[in-house]
Image: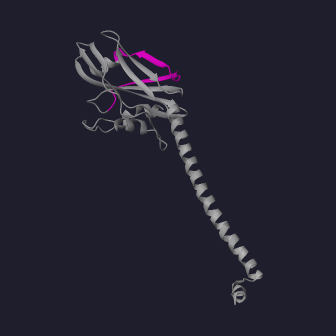
């Protein structure tokens, strides 16, 4: 009786051999799933590493320009431009305006290189007084357009509080830092008119928008 029971549970050798490919397929599928999950984790870790490396590269090499207006005397003031980034830039255009005006009042064309970590300065008391007039007390702003790595950038408006009395600078102090870093100035189409339009778009919210006239695109036309 016992031997008959044992014989009933015996599996033929040929049947056992036929199960081996099935078991191998199941094991291969399990290893494939494990390897696929490991590959996905590796890809995610690689993407995060590349994103961190890209962010660090952009933080170190993206252009960053700081502008400061400083009083020298009662009739003179200077603009101090500092390149805070590692990359060198080529200064192209300095713009001055009162915040009550949407369009820049004074434009000073430049062609001066500025190495990373260094400072460029120039006396512009006459231009500042021409922008403010004989009597003025309030904020003025300055913005710089420059080339870096083959692309044109423009800074946000750096503000300063100025007090002009009888055509003399009584006080000139930096007031606020810009909320944004430099932004790329893109030129689209055959006519390079984006520059003047982009400057007008940066007016403060309290100001009344001023339409750009065709003759105010002097810089774009000359470029």
Is 165 placed left or right of 143 in the picture? Answer: left
Name the foreground residue: 119 vs 133: 119
Residue 6 horizontal/vertical position (percent): 71, 85
Residue 162 horizontal/vertical position (percent): 27, 19
**Magenta run includes residue 104:** yes
When the figure is inspected, residue 49 is found, relative to residue 160, above or below; the finding is below
Q: Residue at x 38, y 32 (%)?
A: 156
Write down the region rendered in magenta.
Answer: 103-126
**Magenta run includes residue 171:** no
Kindly give the residue lying farthest to the top in the view shown.
Answer: 73
Image quadrant for the N terminus? bottom right
Is 170 placed left or right of 39 in the picture? Answer: left
Name the foreground residue: 213 vs 14: 14
Kindly give the residue lying farthest to the front in the view shown.
Answer: 1
Residue 124 horizontal/vertical position (percent): 38, 16
Residue 219 horizontal/vertical position (percent): 43, 31
* Snapshot quadrant of residue 195: top left
Is 42 placed left or right of 93 in the picture? Answer: right
Name the foreground residue: 55 vs 120: 55
* Snapshot quadrant of residue 22: bottom right
When the figure is inspected, residue 11 is found, relative to residue 98, above or below; the finding is below
Is 4 placed left or right of 59 in the picture? Answer: right
> What sort of colour scheme is used for the picture?
one colour
* Snapshot quadrant of residue 141: top left
> Total marks drawn?
0
When the figure is inspected, residue 89 is found, relative to residue 26, above or below; the finding is above
Q: Residue at x 51, y 30 (%)?
A: 147
């Amino acid at each position: 009786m016992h031997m008959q029971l044992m014989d009933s549970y015996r599996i033929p050798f040929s049947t056992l051999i036929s199960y081996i490919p099935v078991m191998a397929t199941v094991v291969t599928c399990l290893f494939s799933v494990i390897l696929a999950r490991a590959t996905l984790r590796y890809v995610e870790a690689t993407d995060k590493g590349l994103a961190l490396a890209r962010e660090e590269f952009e933080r170190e090499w993206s252009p960053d320009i700081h502008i400061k207006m400083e009083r020298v005397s009662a009739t003179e003031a200077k603009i101090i431009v500092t390149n805070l980034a590692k990359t060198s830039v080529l200064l192209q255009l300095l713009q001055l305006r009162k915040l009550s005006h949407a369009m820049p009042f004074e434009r000073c064309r430049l062609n001066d290189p500025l190495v990373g970590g260094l400072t460029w300065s120039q006396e512009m008391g006459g231009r500042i007084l021409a922008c403010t007039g004989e009597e003025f007390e309030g904020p003025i702003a300055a913005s710089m357009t420059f080339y870096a790595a083959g692309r044109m950038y423009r800074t946000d408006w750096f503000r300063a509080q100025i007090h002009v009395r009888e055509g003399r600078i009584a006080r000139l102090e930096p007031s606020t830092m810009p909320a944004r870093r430099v932004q790329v100035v893109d030129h689209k189409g055959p006519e390079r008119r984006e520059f003047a339009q982009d400057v007008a778009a940066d007016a403060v919210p309290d100001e009344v928008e001023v339409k750009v006239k065709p003759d105010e695109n002097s810089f774009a036309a000359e470029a």
